[in-house]
Image: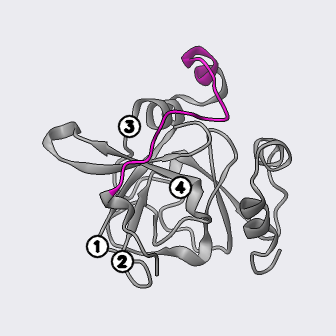
Amino acid sequence: MRSRNPIAQENDKGDYIIKRSESEWKQKLDPLQFEILRNAGTERAFSGQLYDNKKPGIYYSAATGQPLFLSDAKYDSGCGWPSFFEPVTEGAILYRTDRSHGMIRTEIIDSSSGSHLGHVFDDGPPPTGLRYCMNSAAMIFVGIDEVPPPLVSYYMENYATEKEKDAVKNFPGK
């Protein structure tokens, strides 16, 4: 279990290793991905392709190819979005306060580009007690026997930290 609760902390400093203009993001992402990743949009509950995916593998940022979650941290929270109890590495996710829609929530973004992924809540299962509530369109899933797409391979070769490389390399079945 983690010693600190990320919900209580805002750690987005805006210093990302992958920087693109909004027009470049529009060229790289499909319209739904752009709306979610760059405009902090949200898919309708139970509509995302990865909502009930039960295959073993790794979930990566659809914006950058950064590893975000391992399938063994995924669980069915009943909320209608893919849910995880912890990220692949502590540094994969950044947190910032979201005051939209008359609520105060903790938004989660990928640490490599600041792209919106979803929100984190403190109603998750052990061992963390956290629920990382994700948008399917914000992620790419790569099964353990699948070849990663070029976006993922490029990130892993050029930007991945040693912790990210180790987590991916040591994932069961890899």
Of circles 1 and 4, which is in front? Answer: 1
Q: Amino acid at mark 4?
A: Gln
Which residue is depicted at the point 79% across and 75% down? 170
- The numbered disc on residue 41 is 3
In whole angstroms, how far apart are the C-alphas of marks 1 and 2? 6 Å
Magenta-highlighted residues: 9-26
- The numbered disc on residue 123 is 1
Report if residue 13 lies within the magenta region: yes
Q: Residues within 10 Å of mark 3 (few under 14, many from 20)?
A: some
Q: Amino acid at mark 1?
A: Asp
151 or 107: nearer the eye? 107
The outermost residue toward the bottom is 126
Q: Earlier in the sequence, mark 4 or mark 2?
A: 4
Report if residue 83 lies within the magenta region: no
In whole angstroms, how far apart are the C-alphas of marks 3 and 1? 22 Å
Q: Amino acid at mark 2?
A: Gly
Q: Quadrant of residue 55?
A: bottom right
The outermost residue toward the left is 102
Which residue is depicted at the point 77% across and 44% down? 159
Q: Residues within 10 Å of mark 1 (few under 14, many from 20)?
A: few
Q: Residues within 10 Å of mark 4 (few under 14, many from 20)?
A: some
In whole angstroms, how far apart are the C-alphas of marks 1 and 4? 23 Å
In whole angstroms, how far apart are the C-alphas of marks 2 and 3? 25 Å
144 or 4: nearer the eye? 4
Q: Taking 126 as reference, is 156 left or right?
A: right
Quickly name the residue at label 2: 129
